[in-house]
Image: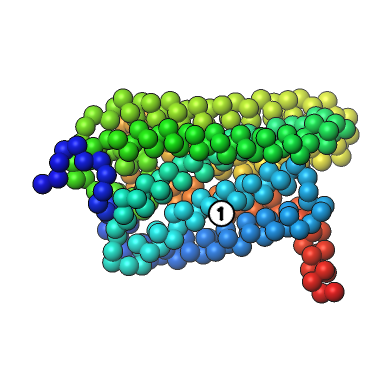
């Protein structure tokens, strides 16, 4: 029998949707399709923002960071998820599980902060258009991006450290399709109340502070738009912010419902469905939202295609 204080070693079993094999097969095809779209869409944005000089602006610098985040986040989960769905072996090693939940939490936390940074960028673009390039200079953009990444990884290190020291007493059955931190915590054979409370506070900070910044910046943007006399100016301001607002709504709406719901209301089936939405749909839709009606991106695509034909 395994010792009660065991917290490392051994494989985990990812249950996923194995109790519903038909649903699992359909879901695996759905996930593969959206993962492919995610790879193509985000790689395209990254390459365009690097190769086209017209996209060397703060907005596309932050968008490139967002695309890198989405690529890394989905890749940290989806390949292992598909292997488990298509094979009979549902196991993942302890080290693989630890890396998965640490990386996923780090990247998700980073995106929370990065979306707030992008809101500030949109605020400066709308409210201080004549000073935009002088305020959002490259050094500041790199500092803001670095702050986003470092705060996200610091939050993950803090929460993951608390989860790693909890004893599991041989409990290795993970009722999810990937190693999600809260599920790993619930495998512990001791009272996890104090640990979960600390994690909730950490999640509240990493979610609450960016949301406060986003709401404040868009309140200022709304006031500035109301004062505009030109209808064309209001339309331009709306176009400037619409894509970011859609991405923020999808990301924060899902993640808040998933991680800030009361403990007594926690439904595992609900959690799995929302996790799929958060993990697959958001990274897939982000590049589409930012490019479908974006004249700069369409111009960059035409320019690069023309260069290839020369």
Q: Taking 278 as reference, is 41 left or right?
A: right
- Seen from this angle, which residue lies furthest left? 1
Question: SS for tag 1?
Answer: helix
Tag 1 residue: 71
Pick whichever, 310 or 157, lies toward us.
157
Quarter residue 201 falls in? top left
Snapshot colouring: rainbow
Residue displayed at 46% across by 53% down: 76
Residue displayed at 49% across by 34% down: 154
Q: Where is 250 relative to 264, above or below?
A: below
Quarter residue 44 falls in? bottom right
Task: Tell me where residue 144 appears, x and y as whole percent.
Answer: 66, 35
Residue displayed at 75% across by 42% down: 58
Q: Where is 248 relative to 97, above or below?
A: above
Quarter of the image with the C terminus is bottom right
Pick whichever, 227 or 188, lies toward us.
188
Q: How many marks?
A: 1
Q: Is residue 81 visible?
A: yes
Pick whichever, 192 or 224, lies toward us.
192
Residue displayed at 31% across by 31% down: 264
Task: Tell me where residue 171 appears, x and y as whole percent.
Answer: 21, 45
Task: Tell me where residue 290 appears, x and y as whole percent.
Answer: 69, 50
Q: Is residue 173 visible?
A: no
Q: Taking 206 as reference, is 82 left or right?
A: left
- Seen from this angle, which residue lies furthest bottom? 309
Q: Taking 254 as reference, is 271 left or right?
A: left
Quarter residue 209 falls in? top right
Task: Tell me where residue 41 appears, x and y as whole percent.
Answer: 63, 59
């Amino acid at each position: 029998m395994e010792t009660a204080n065991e917290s490392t070693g051994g494989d985990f079993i990812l249950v996923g949707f194995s109790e519903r094999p038909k649903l699992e097969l359909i879901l695996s095809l759905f996930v593969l399709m959206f993962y492919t779209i995610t790879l193509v869409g985000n790689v395209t944005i990254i390459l365009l923002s690097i190769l086209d000089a017209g996209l060397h602006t703060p907005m596309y610098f932050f968008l490139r960071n967002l695309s890198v985040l989405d690529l890394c986040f989905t890749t940290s989960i989806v390949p292992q998820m598909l292997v488990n769905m298509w094979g009979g072996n549902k196991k993942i090693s302890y080290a693989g599980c630890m890396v998965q939940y640490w990386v996923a939490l780090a990247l998700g936390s980073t995106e929370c902060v990065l979306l707030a940074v992008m809101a500030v960028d949109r605020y400066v673009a709308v409210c201080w258009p004549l000073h935009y390039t002088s305020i959002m200079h490259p050094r500041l953009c790199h500092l803001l991006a670095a702050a986003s990444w470092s705060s996200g990884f610091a939050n993950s290190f803090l929460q993951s450290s608390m989860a790693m020291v909890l004893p599991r007493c041989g409990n290795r059955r993970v009722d999810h399709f990937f190693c999600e931190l809260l599920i790993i915590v619930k495998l512990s054979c001791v009272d996890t109340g104090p640990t979960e409370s600390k994690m909730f506070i950490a999640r509240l900070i990493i979610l609450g502070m960016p949301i406060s910044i986003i709401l404040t910046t868009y309140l200022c943007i709304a006031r500035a738009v109301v004062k505009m006399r030109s209808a064309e100016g209001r339309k331009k301001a709306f176009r400037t912010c619409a894509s970011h607002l859609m991405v923020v709504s999808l990301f924060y709406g899902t993640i808040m419902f998933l991680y800030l719901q009361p403990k007594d209301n926690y439904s595992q089936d609900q959690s799995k469905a929302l996790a799929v939405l958060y993990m697959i749909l958001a990274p897939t839709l982000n590049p589409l939202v930012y490019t479908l009606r974006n004249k700069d991106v369409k111009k960059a695509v035409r320019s690069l295609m023309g260069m290839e034909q020369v």
